[in-house]
Image: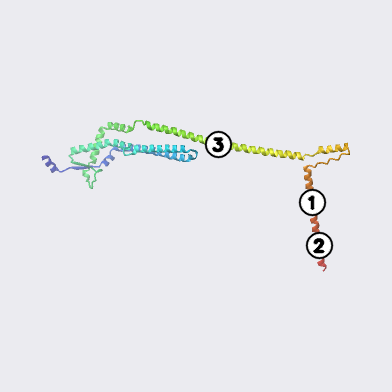
């Protein structure tokens, strides 16, 4: 009853703190936040690079589909889907609700939150506060500045930090350097090795198919060239045969004439052998005949023209006389 009476006489002491303001003014919090953001950006860039590589593989597959069989296309699409799933699982592992970012943030923030809680407990005991609220977690429509205990908490944490600065930094650095999943994932390594082997097999199959197509194309070109060469040789042979035949027919038959003359000198009773006209002589006779016919037609045309002119002149003279 005496204690209740004393409390009733002095009234209830209430204060509040602003956790966000306190954290912004603690160097340890700023350092931890910067390190965590740097690590998160590193993970994000790593994931973006892997997703870009997956997209490039899809484009390469689309460009190479004409050279691949259906089995190779299905196999590569399956590998791409598997790699994409691995990347999405890795993204969930890093940024998921229970991922590395959440766990490391909790690990780095827990010491600072403990310091704030210890400072509040000590201040409440020494200053005899009955209630201390957190402005960042409580809806406060109005709060007077005189009841704000944030600066006192910051000074208390700073003094404590100076006393244990060396140990705190060593522990913090050890926590930051600690890897969350230190064990080796043998299953993932086996999958990656299998993917590399499949990739090497696909590249070998693509190169083999490309080489076969190039060889087939070269064989077709060679066959066409041989066929063309054979046709040219046949044409040249036929042309040469025609030239030989023409040469044989165009040779003058001097020997026949000499033979006929010698026969005539030996006996007068045997009939004379007629000379065989050569093709050139026949062509010349034909040409002379055509020239003679052309001259005759020309002469006939001149005579007709002269006759017509004479008749016109006679008619003109007759008209003049009349």
Q: Secondary structure at mark 1?
A: helix
Judge whether 111 appears above or below 288 on screen: above
Q: Nearer the viewer, mark 1 or mark 2?
A: 1
Residue placed most toward the observer, 71 or 322: 71
Residue 120's quadrant in the figure?
Answer: top left
Judge whether 275 appears above or below 201 on screen: below
Mark 1 in CB contact with mark 2 (< 8 angstroms) = no
Residue 216's label in the rendered image is 3
How far across and down, in percent of the image, does residue 100 sit?
A: 33, 36
Residue 173's quadrant in the figure?
Answer: top left
Residue visible at 26% across and 37% down in the picture: 113
User: Along the horizontal axis of the image, is 37 left or right of 2?
Assistant: right
Of the image marks 3 and 2, the number of the one nearer the N terminus? 3
Q: Quadrant of the C terminus?
A: bottom right
Residue placed most toward the observer, 146 or 58: 58
Residue farthest to the bottom?
322
Residue visible at 69% across and 37% down in the picture: 237
The residue under label 1 is: 293
Distance from disc 3 to disc 2, alpha carbons, whole Å, reads 86 Å
Badge 1: residue crowd in 10 Å (few <14, some 14–19, many ≥20) = few
Of the image marks 1 and 3, the number of the one nearer the N terminus? 3
The residue under label 2 is: 311
Of the image marks 1 and 2, the number of the one nearer the N terminus? 1
Residue farthest to the left?
1
């Amino acid at each position: 009853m005496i204690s209740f009476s004393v409390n009733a006489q002095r009234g209830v002491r209430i204060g509040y703190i602003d956790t966000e303001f306190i954290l912004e003014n603690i160097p340890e919090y700023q350092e931890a936040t910067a390190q965590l953001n740097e690590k998160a950006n590193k993970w994000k860039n790593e994931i973006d690079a892997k997703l870009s590589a997956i997209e490039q593989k899809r484009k390469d597959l689309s460009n190479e589909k004409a050279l691949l069989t259906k089995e190779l296309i299905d196999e590569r699409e399956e590998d791409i889907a598997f790699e994409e799933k691995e990347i999405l699982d890795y993204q969930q592992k890093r940024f998921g609700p229970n991922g590395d970012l959440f766990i490391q943030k909790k690990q780095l923030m827990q010491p600072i939150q403990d310091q704030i809680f210890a400072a509040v407990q000590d201040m409440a005991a020494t200053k005899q506060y009955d209630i201390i609220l957190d402005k960042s977690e409580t809806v406060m429509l109005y709060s007077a500045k005189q009841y704000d205990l944030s600066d006192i908490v910051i000074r208390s944490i700073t003094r404590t930090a100076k006393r244990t600065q060396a140990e705190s930094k060593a522990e913090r650095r050890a926590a930051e350097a600690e890897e969350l999943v230190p064990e080796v994932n043998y299953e993932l390594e086996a999958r990656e090795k299998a993917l590399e082997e499949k990739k090497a097999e696909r590249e070998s199959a693509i190169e083999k198919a490309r080489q076969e197509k190039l060889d087939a194309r070269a064989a077709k070109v060679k066959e066409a060239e041989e066929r063309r060469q054979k046709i040219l040789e046949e044409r040249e042979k036929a042309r040469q045969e025609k030239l030989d035949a023409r040469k044989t027919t165009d040779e003058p038959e001097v020997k026949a004439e000499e033979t006929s003359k010698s026969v005539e000198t030996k006996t007068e009773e045997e009939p004379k052998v007629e000379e065989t006209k050569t093709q050139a002589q026949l062509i010349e006779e034909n040409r002379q005949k055509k020239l003679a016919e052309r001259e005759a037609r020309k002469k006939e045309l001149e005579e007709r023209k002269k006759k017509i002119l004479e008749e016109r002149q006679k008619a003109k003279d007759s008209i003049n006389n009349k």
